[in-house]
Amino acid sequence: QVQLQESGPGLVKPSETLSLTCTVSGGSISPYYWGWMRQPPGKGLEFVGWVYYTGTTSYNPSLKSRVVLSLDTSKSQFSLKVTSLSAADTAVYYCARAMDSKPFDIWGQGTMVTVSS
Amino acid sequence: EIVLTQSPGTLSLSPGERATLSCRASQTVRRSYLAWYQQKPGQAPRLLMYDASSRATGIADRFSGSGSGTDFTLTISRLEPEDFAVYYCKQYGTPPVTFGQGTRLEIK
């Protein structure tokens, strides 16, 4: 059974960079898409981006200038970096998996990130 | 990007009743690549439907999806107590992936 687990700091200061990692267990990195979504408190879901097992990436245009996704197949991990943080980036961040031409079907439990000084 | 508008915002029904949730897209969803998720408080979203009308693994057959083009529907034939949650539609046919704002299904 494939499981995903997010890890990273729960509190980050404004203007700093957030780094989150998602660890994949019970399955292979290939041939899947590995994505990140976020959900501000009390609000809906927002797509952040995905990284394909080949390393190809795609980002939400609204975040593209501040987001970088990467993959470490040797560790079965993929990572998210968000720069120039503001309070608007406060959210639960989820990692998830998708097959080609399919929606994200397996999700991590989510990790709450608060941007505050 | 494709904007998805869900209606109603909140739906108040009783167990045993039928629920009909709507998702309208601002432009055609390519190949009906439309999914539905269920989210309960404090939990990650759970995939219910994909490709508009295919049930995900392990999803009860009281859930069904329909639609094409720009209009899609999620139907829950007879509500069980565990079905009261927030439901999101999502299109994955045209980048970027986009979500609707959600419909809250609450107990009447």
Image (cartoon, grey):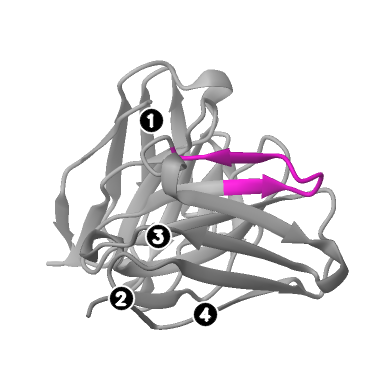
Q: How crowded is mark 4: few (under 14 residues within 10 Å), some or many (20 or more)?
A: some
Q: Name the residue under label 1.
A: B72
Labels 3 and 2: the sequence-earlier one = 2
Residue A60, percent across and down?
45, 40
Q: Which residue is drawn at 31% across and 64% down?
A: A15
Q: Which residue is drawn at 56% across and 64% down?
A: A95
Which marked residue is nearer to the observer: mark 3 or mark 4? 4
Magenta span of residues: A50-60
Verify CB contact (< 8 Å) between mark 2 and mark 1. Answer: no
Output the chain of dot 4: A
Q: In this view, does B55 lie above or below A11?
A: above
Task: Examine the structure image and report whether residue A93 is included in the region drawn in magenta.
Answer: no
Please determine if labels 4 and 1 lie on a single subunit: no
| Quarter of the image with the N terminus of chain A in it | bottom right
As measured in the structure, the alpha-carbon distance from the residue carrying label 2 to the one carrying label 1 is 41 Å
Q: Residue A38 carries which label?
A: 3
Q: Name the residue under label 4.
A: A8
Q: Is mark 1 on a helix, strand or loop?
A: strand
Q: Name the residue under label 2.
A: A13
Name the amino acid, label 2: Lys
Question: Residue A61 versus residue B7: which sits nearer the camera?
Answer: A61
Name the amino acid, label 4: Gly
Please determine if labels 4 and 2 lie on a single subunit: yes
Q: What element carries label 2?
A: loop
